[in-house]
Image (cartoon, rainbow, N blue to C red):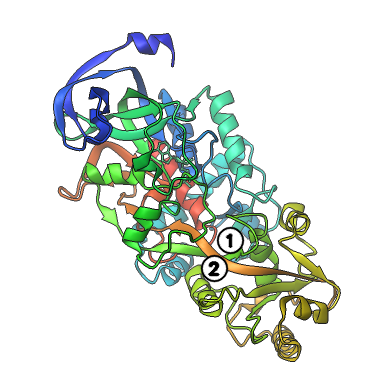
Amino acid sequence: MSSSNVSRRNFVKMSMVGAGALALGGLNAHADTKGSVKFDEEYDVVIIGSGFAGLAAAITSTEKGNKVLILEKMGRMGGNSVINGGIFAVPHSDLQQKAGIKDSNELFIKDCLKAGRGYNYVELINTIANRAQDAYKLTLKCGAKYVPEITHAGGHSVARSLQTANGSGSGIVQPMIEYFQNNLKGEIRTRAKFDSFVLDESGGVIGVNIREEYRFDTKSLNDDIENTTGTPKTIRAKKAVVLATGGFCRDAFFRKTQHPTIKDDVDSTNHPGATAGGLVEALRIGATPVQLSWIQYGPWACADEKGFGVGSMFNVNASFRYGISVNPKTGKRYMNELADRRTRSEAMFKVIGDDQNYPINFCDSQGVATLMDSHFKKPLESGVLKKFDTIEDMAAHFKIPLEPLKESIKKYNEGVKAGKDEFGKPMDTVAGIMIEKPPFYAVRGTPKLHHTMGGVMINTKAQVIDAKTHKPIPGLYAAGEVTGGVHGASRLGSVAISDCLVFGMIAGENI
Ligand code: ADP
């Protein structure tokens, strides 16, 4: 905090909402409180969250001449964005054109609608199709690097996804942070937790109540309500606040209220801070909730490690593409390994049952030939990924009945040759690779909670829509996983980065 900010104390007549009463001393006060608010600092734009969405908003908004502050409650920046696999769907990219792949907005929308079971907001997907190129260029300007080949992510009808050169979302997040901090002299404050909005008399957002030196409790399942650490402060946002707090896969209470079958101890690929606090504050001031109960499992996670781990990308890029997943009890395949995430997760849970009968995902040496080290060597070194010289060894290790397993491999290989798979796997994506050349590589697969499709309603300008007036809440924008509607019932892999970057960028452009 600069001293010039401290000296610019503003006293505004307004209503304070929720823990906005914090400034008056009560952490859990929820009712509107009329009174004067003393601002400790002042910015044009305050952005809550330092993932893809928050960073994109921060960069475009700063480039328009605004003084921008990013608040991040965790000690580390980047949320889920920094730990995901770094696959980014960009219809009409230069790489797609170079590969001679024909794509269209209509096809992209059709794919998203198919995975989303038709619950998607088409105008938002269309906006992504129109602007993903610009978001891609924004990341290139910041210094992000991508592998030169286009990737065909599960559930897409054509290859249209880019893969970061380091195989992780950090390949985009880190350059964006550096660009924002070094080139634009922007400010990111970590351990700064947003608690509530400050509103003016007409209900417009004019600031935020936060706590500095906040210490997130990684052991708490309900950090947003149990944690009272930190020092309160009130910050004025002269032009707007952007809510970019991500999803709530790690919020045991909130996810269970929306989706009662989710158990408290189920694992998630998300960072520990993926909680619903920010979303709840937006709902408190009247934001329209959209489809909060659509919560997605990532089907490509591994049972023998915690979180997103190092094995997920082996499944995404090798076993599911160039290999198969079998039920260890029967040795048989049971799904199209490249179907959308919801379809695959449902199929896998049926196999897992109540006795943790985790499916075995595997491929041969050709399947891993093009994997980058972070997707191959790392899981091998960690022990999550196992190497076998023969199918017999693999069957013995996982106690899979050998003959049915061999039969499954034979049938799959015949399908590769014939270009037609019994489960409908798109054979044009497997590059003719059969499971035949040792060694073989296998993991125990499991779905883990990965993405919350629901969130606050936004329009194509990233403005948050009031449930009562159906109009934008003045001064409030939102982008990324905290918003709902784009993905419908199930998000297609690699469209999260597009969603977060596009609407973050748009929020910044429109403020
Ligand atoms: P997205 O992909 O939508 O950008 P991310 O999960 O990558 O989402 O980033 C969201 C960030 O917001 C995370 O780093 C998370 O810690 C942060 N965050 C969540 N809630 C708060 C809050 N109340 N105050 C400050 N930061 C928050």
The residue under label 1 is 160
Is mark 2 in CB contact (under 8 Å) with mark 1?
yes
In this picture, is 420 found above or below 64? below
Q: Nearer the viewer, residue 103 or 32?
A: 32
Decide: few, some or many residues near mark 2? Use Cα within 10 Å; few <14, some 14-19, many ≥20.
many
Q: Is residue 492 in sight in this rendering?
A: no
Q: Secondary structure at mark 1?
A: loop
Quarter of the picture holding the N terminus: top left
In this picture, is 8 found above or below 143? above
Q: Position of residue 83 (x, y in %)?
A: 59, 48
Q: Secondary structure at mark 2?
A: loop
Q: Amino acid at mark 1?
A: Arg
At x 23% / y 40%, what residue is drawn?
Answer: 473
Q: Position of residue 165 (x, y in %)?
A: 69, 48
Mark sitting on residue 242: none
Quarter of the picture holding the C terminus: top left
Rendered-image quarter of ligand 1? top left
The residue under label 2 is 156
